Image: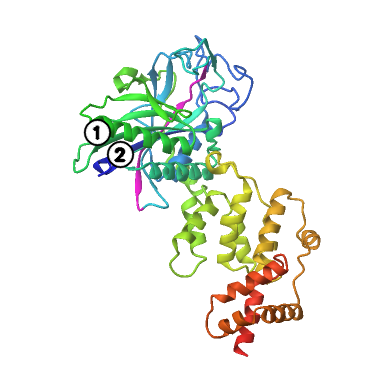
Amino acid sequence: MAIEDEYIITIGLEVHCELKTNTKLFCGCANQFGSEPNTNICPVCLGLPGSLPVINERAVEYAIRIGSALSCEIRPSVFHRKNYFYPDMPKDYQVSQYDEPICVNGKLELPSFPKTVRIERAHMEEDTGKTTHVGTSGRIHGADFSLVDYNRAGIPLVEIVSAPDLSSADEAREYVSELRAILVSTKASDGKMEEGSLRVDANVSVRPLGTEKLGTRCEIKNLNSLRSLGRAINYEARRQMEALSAGQSIRQETRHWNEDQGVTSALRSKEEAYDYRYFPEPDLTPLDPDMDEVATIARALGILPPARRLRLRELLDGELTRSELEQVQTCVKFDLDEHVLDAVRTGVPARLALARGSNELASYVNQATVDSFEVAEFPRGKFIEVISLESQGKVSSTQAKTLLSRIASNHNEEVSALIEELGYKAASQDEISELLDRLISENSMEWERLCAGENQLAGFFIGKAMKITNGKVNGKTLASEMAARRLG
């Protein structure tokens, strides 16, 4: 038995989501990525004596949007000081919400797994500064010196804490992907993992098969891509399994993920709540959201990813295949569902629109979106024009894919001009008949076998036609002509 079959993995995730406000949580400094270091700072976010924080109203609204989208209860909340002594916060504490968070008891359904993940809380806090350790190691140990940029200090965050309901790296990746899609849909966050707008801490533990008590957890900090998340969880789970199998114990600790080496390493022993010496922030009043306003915010959320997937599924008759379910999810993930819906409204068959959207279009939209989620817009009208021509038999499937590829490379390309340039003029009925006459003459034995019932030979003739015409013949039209000849 493999070692993985002897243990159960338990995973809980803490997702740190930067809010897309114009200014920071407690001051008027710009919330802007990529500025020159230490230019978006002031006495408040530097914690200078005599400075006083003022809550950002838009940040509170965004937190309520997120909580509502995750089916959370929105409650009165209190800010606390979370004390710790790291150089990325100049005042030596972080303003956060401790035992009275604004959002509690939510849920998130995984699209591809029959599982609902409980959301324990989604609380507001300020982000910390960014420390860069200069030297060959890139870590504080062995660094020549360290640089601190306080531009990020004070940026509004919502930390979304799941229950330990996940049991594999694949589930964890899908949870973050679905959560990210929901966050972006609320317009509360841009969800850009590559810019640090979305960061994940993964709590991982293992326990022997057949036992109920959860194992000792280790927290992997600051994972900033889906690939890193999956690799880190798999490595850490196996590390713990091997240690337990060797009779060793697991120490509760915080660990660092090294992307280049593919390993986790110990950072520090895991802190408990008392280590942070929480106490209410004396300079901020409690938040007590008006429930009528909360309801108004919830109603204005619009269509979230689960409902968007349902709209696409309802376009298809009967039970969807696994491939079709994946196509639906891909179109929503890459924000292509409106392309598909608009195409269907113009009369394009739903399965054709869904296939072209999820396969060709998704791959052309942006080849680097798997982790970065950066989606470039594809001209919707030209997408519809191309697949409409395909559905009418005026261009072949091969030609439609080529047209979409050319338009993806240059959005200014006109479909009609491309068809003229590439010679994609639809063959007339007479031309189709002449082509079939030639094919039958050159392959008479295969034609007799096809007429005798060897239906798989239809693909043989279509392939020959594609080769003769350099892919310009419409396979469906040719297949119809062959069927008519056989019946005749």
Prevailing secondary structure class for the magenta stretch in the rendered image: strand
Say which element carries label 2: strand
The CA distance from mark 1 to mark 2 is 8 Å
Give x and y (percent) for residue 363: 60, 50
Query: Does the image show residue 392?
Result: no
Q: Residue 482: which quarter of the image?
A: bottom right
What residue is shown with label 1?
Answer: 215
**Who's the residue at 37% across and 37% down the image?**
234
Find the magenta span and give its range.
114-133
Is 369 on the left-hand or right-hand side of 216? right
- Nearest the viewer among 42 and 437 is 437
Query: Does the image show residue 96?
Result: yes
Label drawn at residue 182: none
Q: Residue 207: which quarter of the image?
A: top left
Q: Amino acid at mark 2?
A: Thr
Label 1 with label 2: CB-CB less than 8 Å = yes
Q: Is residue 115 magenta?
A: yes
